[in-house]
Image: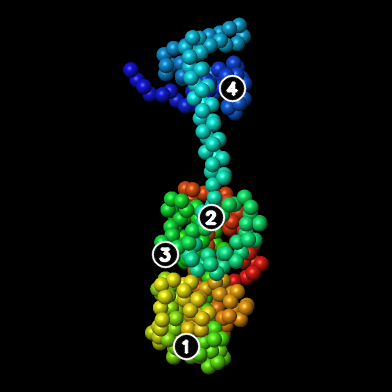
Amino acid sequence: MSRNLPPLNALRAFEATARLNSVSQAAEQLHVTHGAVSRQLKVLEEHLGVSLFIKDGRGLKLTDSGVRLRDVSAEAFERLRDVCAELTQASADAPFVLGCSGSLLARWLIPRLGRLNADLPDLRLHLSAGDGDLDPRRPGLDALLLFAEPPWPADMQVFELASERIGPVMSPRFAGYERLRQAPAAALCSEALLHTTSRPQAWPSWAQQHGIAPGALKHGQGFEHLYYLLEAAVAGLGVAIAPQPLVAEDVRAGRLVAPWGFSETPAHLALWLPKRAADGRAGQLAQWLKAELVRQPL
């Protein structure tokens, strides 16, 4: 004996008709035609090999088989509705998990977090920090905020927020500050430059844009993460290379100076999320981030 279930559309048509005791009302509720419901009822009866309704004057009356199926299907569909409602509510109540690098989180996002939470109170943002190990495809992560170069992966929805700008920075506490602050960019060739293994191309890219052979630069103290590199620069340990948004507040406060300005790179600050898991909250967050970047340009 076959245990295959009948087509779901046929069961839905039957459950609605039996519950409302009307083909016309079932059609209205299901947003289909009277004829479509009638055809689905016929499909169901042919699949089961039994009659579910009999004519009763101008209306319909359930057979004994129809009564049995009505009771079971009503309970099953009600349970499905309840569970789907619970899942939808749970999804709406779940936090939006945003991944980003520790340096971007600490130096740019956290100082704006109070304003973000006030402007988007329903977002319930949860932040996950990492460097080089974050992937928006990873379960438990809804989106990723990062600097990256196009082309973008085909399976990602990417909101481009701003072009990346990088430049050398140093502290007034640095021993070579007075000598370098009005010197041409080529003067950095004589310095042991602070660098980070997470952005090995930052110094060479900047050098090429300023007509300096990358090989002419000398690397000094290295750091695993950009955050530590920038802390070392603030402490006066040397000249570092940094994305403008991550040092903008330090430059405004005078803790760092950028004598040679900032140059645009091919990269963009962008919000990534998998297309298969598109979330409307990502669009809200992207709009807020863009507005923030306009309010306080990079």
Q: What residue type is labelled 3?
A: Gly
Position in image of residue 253 (x %, y %): 62, 78
Q: Can you see residue 166?
A: yes
Q: Is residue 165 above or below residue 178?
A: above
N-term-proximal mark, 3 vs 4: 4
Position in image of residue 264 (x %, y %): 53, 74
Pointer 4 with pointer 2, Cβ within 8 A: no
How far is mark 1 from mark 3, CA to CA?
A: 28 Å
How far is mark 4 from mark 1, CA to CA?
A: 78 Å
Q: What residue would you read off at disc 2?
A: 126
* Mark number displayed over residue 26: 4
N-term-proximal mark, 4 vs 2: 4
How far is mark 2 from mark 1, CA to CA?
A: 40 Å
Q: What element carries label 4?
A: helix
Q: What element carries label 3?
A: loop
* Mark number displayed over residue 132: 3
Q: What residue would you read off at disc 1?
A: 188
Q: Which amino acid does label 4 sit on?
A: Ala
Q: How is the image coloured?
A: rainbow
How far is mark 3 from mark 2, CA to CA?
A: 19 Å
How far is mark 4 from mark 2, CA to CA?
A: 43 Å
Instruction: Look at discs 1 and 3 and give the one toward the viewer.
Output: 3
